[in-house]
Amino acid sequence: MLDMLLGELLVVEEHLWAIAPGDWIPPGEPSAPDEGHPLPDAPAPDPEAVRIIKQLLEEPEFLRTFFQPVVSLAEGRVIGYEALTRGPSGTVLESPRVLFSLARRAGLLLELDRLSRLLAVRRAAGLVPPDDLLFLNVASVAPLLRVTVTPPAGATPSTPGMAAAEAGAPAACPRDALYLDELKAELRHPAVLELSEEDPSLRDPLLAPILPALRAKGWQFSLDDFGVAFSGLASLVELQPEWLKLDRVLVKGLASDPRRRRFLATLVEGARRAGINVVAEQVETLDELAVLLAENVAFAQGYVLAPPAPVPPSLSPEAMELLTKYQRP
């Protein structure tokens, strides 16, 4: 079955180019942005996309999970791993950008998103040390906004969750939390749900009131891709995540741009005062890593430390040497 699926995917590659022109980055590129996150809304479902994604959902062994370390720069050690989904090796769907874009075009993004997290949790159980954090991407928080509430007496809300919020009534646990409960039951690690700044649902006023109920169940949250959208600061204030992941746009050129470096230092200090852990993502050079260390950025992730791999990788010798030089007593 694997050979058959791979053959089919190679045959339809030309079709994928036609329905998603310019959407993907070839596998193996050193800086694949938006790992694990979808592109903006797409047109009506494409039949070929539906067929391909449904086959992957039915045969999840073709979906691979890679792990990339999140490193404490002060301690020079790994504190957790981000789980990243890859499609079948040797096909266009190996790129997560293509895979999730195609799932969106098929109208099956949430199904693929849920399955990806479930596979990550199960595979991490035998690979990731139990005390390490597991960072799990969330393609869209929209399902969490479909809340079930008991409206105030005499109320006839058109949107139950909004009506309850306006009336000051606490929203019940979202229906999608039943899925999260099932996922939590399989978890063997403390987990962080990564919410992408590019997700338009992040700006919905119903989201912030829901998060405390999920935090009470043990979930932590990260605002991912920070710096690529105009709503980043607003989302940071509203959601108050435990973690903040800085996009490549804020990391690139740090070593040669004093203004960018000053901005980074101000942002890091503000987050520290708010009790938010800052992770610099997509760190690609030793020069960038050195600036992050000098500016007391607490955590980092990127190819210069270790690339994503099916088995959690060790940190590179060059990065370890630099980390050792900057280790604080």
Image (spheres, rainbow, N blue to C red):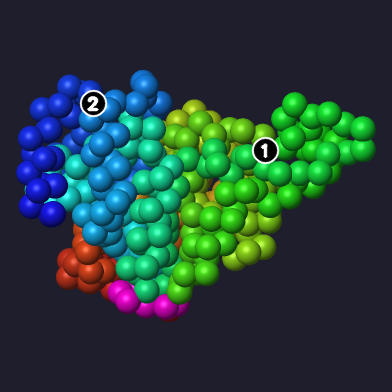
The vertical placement of 158 against 81, above or below, is: above
Q: Work out whether residue 303 can be spotted.
A: no
Q: Assess disc 2: are there few (<14), some (14-19) or many (≥20) residues with their C-alpha within 10 Å of its C-alpha.
A: some
Image location of residue 313, percent across then percent down: 23, 69
Q: Residue at x 67, y 34 (%)?
A: 205
Image location of residue 320, percent across then percent down: 24, 70
- Quarter of the image that includes the N terminus: bottom left
Q: Quadrant of residue 122?
A: bottom left
Q: What amino acid type should be assigned to the residue bearing mark 2?
A: Ala
Residue on which disc 1 sits: 206
> Which of pointers 2 and 1 lies earlier in the amino acid sequence?
2
Q: Nearer the viewer, residue 242 or 323?
A: 242
The boundaries of the magenta stretch are 126-131
Cα separation between marks 2 and 1? 32 Å
The reply to whether the magenta stretch includes residue 234 is: no
Q: Residue at x 32, y 76 (%)?
A: 126
The disc at residue 20 is 2
The reply to whether the magenta stretch includes residue 129 is: yes
Is 111 placed left or right of 235 in the picture? left
